[in-house]
Image (tube, rainbow, N blue to C red):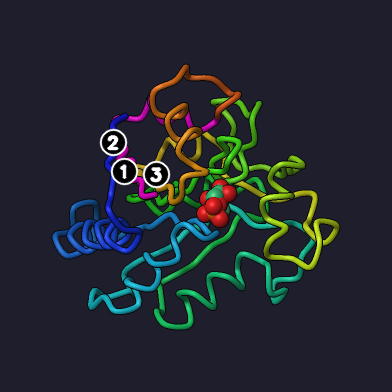
Amino acid sequence: MNIDIYNSYDNMCKKVVEDIRYAINFNMFSEYFTLGLATGSTPLSIYKYIRDENWEANKVTTFNLDEYSDLPYNHPQSYEHFMEENLFMYKQFRYSYFPENERYDDLIKNKGGIDIQILGIGTNGHIAFNEPGSSRDSLTRKVELTENTRKDNSRFFDSIDDVPTHAWTMGIESIMRAKQIYLLASGKHKKEILEKACHGEITSDVPASFLQEHNNVEVLYCD
Ligand code: F6R
């Protein structure tokens, strides 16, 4: 996988938004487009730019990658709340879903599969909440979060003890079924793991490395 290097975070995000616009306006996939969404810091400007897009959001269905379990939906750190604040309160999509049981992959399939999937990468190489050790065949399931991920995410909570220990996540196989994938990383602290994911051995120790087996992935990086 080639890594496209961008000179600014905003330009990197604009490129993804332009590609989504093109895919929707030219019905590249289907009339009812499905967009796979990530939370966290990385896609924030993508959502900022999508708010100003003119395409008809009511033709688009969204599927989020993951959601903490055991947090009420209106908890400020729930991913549903994050999406509401950063995107959904500005754009009315046809349907928006979050994983909360094992039927999620069937739901995605029934909606025609994910056309474009946006991904960030964890400093331990996770994609969604597929932590190191996750199997290539994994589907949507409830997982235990590693200490590393809870520590990384504690910046959004008062303390690490408040970070949930479990989450629902799409699996590696669920992600690999997307027709097109954008893997984004922003910041020098992500450079080494991104290199490993893109050019290293394909191994469950670095879950993002499985993306090397997908035939339609774009990798975008900025310092
Ligand atoms: C979030 C998700 C995670 C993040 C990753 C990077 O929905 O799926 O895999 O993409 O932890 O997080 P940030 O972007 O905050 O560095």
* Percent of width and height locating residue 137: 55, 27
Pointer 1 residue:
180
Front position among marks 2 and 3: 3
- Secondary structure, mark 2, is loop
| Up-down relation of residue 14 to residue 101 (above or below) | below
Residue at 46% of width from left, 69% of height from top?
A: 95
Estimate the spatial distance between the alpha carbons at disc 3 and disc 1, rounded to whole Å. 10 Å
**Near-viewer residue (26 or 44):** 44
| Residues shaded magenta | 207-223
* Percent of width and height locating residue 201: 47, 17
Name the side, left or right, on which 9 lies relative to 78: left
Q: Residues within 10 Å of mark 2 (few under 14, many from 20)?
A: some
| Up-down relation of residue 104 to residue 61 (above or below) | above
* Percent of width and height locating residue 204: 58, 23
Pointer 3 residue:
183
Q: Which residue type carries mark 2?
A: Asn
**Near-viewer residue (2 or 17):** 2
Label 1 CB-ligand 1 distance < 8 A: no
Residue at 44% of width from left, 46% of height from top?
A: 109
Residue 209: in magenta span: yes
Pointer 2 residue:
216
Disc on the earlier residue, 2 or 3: 3
Query: Do the numbered discs 2 and 1 sit on residues whose CB atoms are within 8 Å?
Result: yes
